[in-house]
Amino acid sequence: MDLSNLQSLKFFYPEMVLTGVILFLVLLDLVLKNKRALGLLAAAGCLLALFATWQLYGMSAGWLFHRMIVLDNFSLFFKVLSLLATLMVIWMSLDSREVETLHQGEYYTILLTSTLGMFFMASSSNLLMAYLSLELVSLTSYILTGLLPHNRRSSEAALKYLIYGGVASGTMIYGMSWIFGMTGSLDYARIHEVLFQGEVNRLSLFMAFVFILAGFGYKIVFVPFHMWSPDVYQGAPIPITAFLSVGSNAAGVAILLRFFFPAVSSLSAGGKWLSISGVEWPHFLIAVSIVTMTLGNLSALGQQNVKRMLAYSGIAHAGYILMGLVVLNNAGLMAVLFYVVVYLIMNLGAFLVVLIVANATGREDLEGYRGLAWRGAAIPAICMAIFLFSLTGLPPLAGFVGKFFLFAAVIREGGLLFYLLAVAAAINSVISLYYYAKIVKTMFLDFPEPKDPQVAMTPTSSALLGVLTTLTLFFGLYWGPLVDYANQSLRFFIK
């Protein structure tokens, strides 16, 4: 299926719904005095777009808008994931003291615009579309990071994000220009066809892949494109930090998988992906994975700011996610999709507790969690412990199952490099337990001081915390439906 612009519109309902809600929010912001209603409307728009996306399951896969984007189960998976992440971030924002100080019409409009960009990142089947969608997400992320008024830390974070993002995007488009020069096309299917004819220079192709990884890598936050992450996570409003850690990260995984598998790898009959002979990008990513998880975990050990600690934790988890890519089979890709979902759940839960504590105390440092369980916040403290132990990978939690699938895919592949990767990941998981347990110890074993305020939850935060905690426990005990959904989502439309 290769549809024209008009024919494509009937498969474009989720994007049209989001666009309509964005425009309606802009107009409503001019007349509405109760700005909280804007958040509720944005959440309703996400639910409507989610329903429209779900209706596309079962439709024939194919190219839309003259092969600029593609409709398949893979793109639908990440659209659903982006909408769920945005919906939960809006839910968090309704109770955020920081968001109350913002121009909320602009805030929710830009947040939904970033989600729209993530839709296009997941479904891009053309290098130009991939670049434009990534830039849309990046530009809106810069704005969201610097939205806090009269806040030097927020403005500094946005500026650093802009500089790093500009350099990464420039490097990426330079690599894309090499691909275009070698293949004469920006279309993924045509690029695949030319590359597997074996008529391109292998060294030049490898360098082009490295340049393109710069752009994709700064979204996923793997080394050496991670340097913006700690400052941005610390300076941005807490809901936006959560959004960048899960939504932006998931969109980066989507655009990376779409390019490095259907575009520049070939699927064999046994479910094994074959890379181009002489271009060993999987071996390059093995090294990147080990360095990323090690640097992230070691850097997190000495952090006192919890948001900054979770930023370095996110870098480490980007290294774990890369484990599923390097094995070049569908088992590894399924593990990646599964892990992206459970990471979204447990990381959003951790940031929600950060939000609850910050609302009550105005603090984000570790001392603000001193004796949290004895300051009227026993339930958030218990939930935080569940999220942190899940991030570590302890059973019977969802993070354990996610890491199990990643480790199993790597070990099953065999070979010295893959065993080395598995050992490095295991050691790093043990290292991560130290700084996660440090937060748990502070919440339960350190006694509060008289100056430490009581911490209370609103019904909105309580409901979301209950949902995220339940899902973390549920997928740790019964993961079959999510595994099936991830497997079904690996149906790439190629031609």
Image (spheres, grey):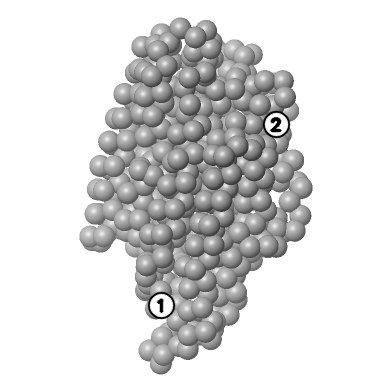
* Residue 418 visible to an observer of this rendering: yes
Tell me the amino acid under the disc marked 1: Gly
Q: Secondary structure at mark 1?
A: helix
Image quadrant occupied by the C terminus: top right
| Residue contact at pointers 2 and 1, CB within 8 angstroms | no
Apparent side of residue 207 relative to residue 417 in the rendered image (left or right) = left
Mark nearest the camera among 2 and 1 is 1
Apparent side of residue 213 relative to residue 410 in the rendered image (left or right) = left
Residue under the point 31% across and 56% down = 231
* Residue 82 visible to an observer of this rendering: no
* Residue at image mark 1: 368
Rendered position, 395 above or below 494: below
Tell me the amino acid under the disc marked 2: Tyr
User: In the picture, residue 103 is in which quadrant?
Assistant: bottom left
Residue under the point 57% across and 39% down = 416
Residue 84: x and y in percent read 58, 48
Image quadrant occupied by the N terminus: top right
Q: Residues within 10 Å of mark 2 (few under 14, many from 20)?
A: some
User: Front-most of 403 and 38?
Assistant: 403
Rendered position, 398 above or below 281: below
Apparent side of residue 191 relative to residue 31 in the rendered image (left or right) = right
Real-space Cα separation, disc 2 to disc 1, in angstroms:
46 Å
* Residue at image mark 2: 57
Residue under the point 25% across and 42% down = 163
Q: Upstream in the sequence, badge 2 or badge 1? A: 2
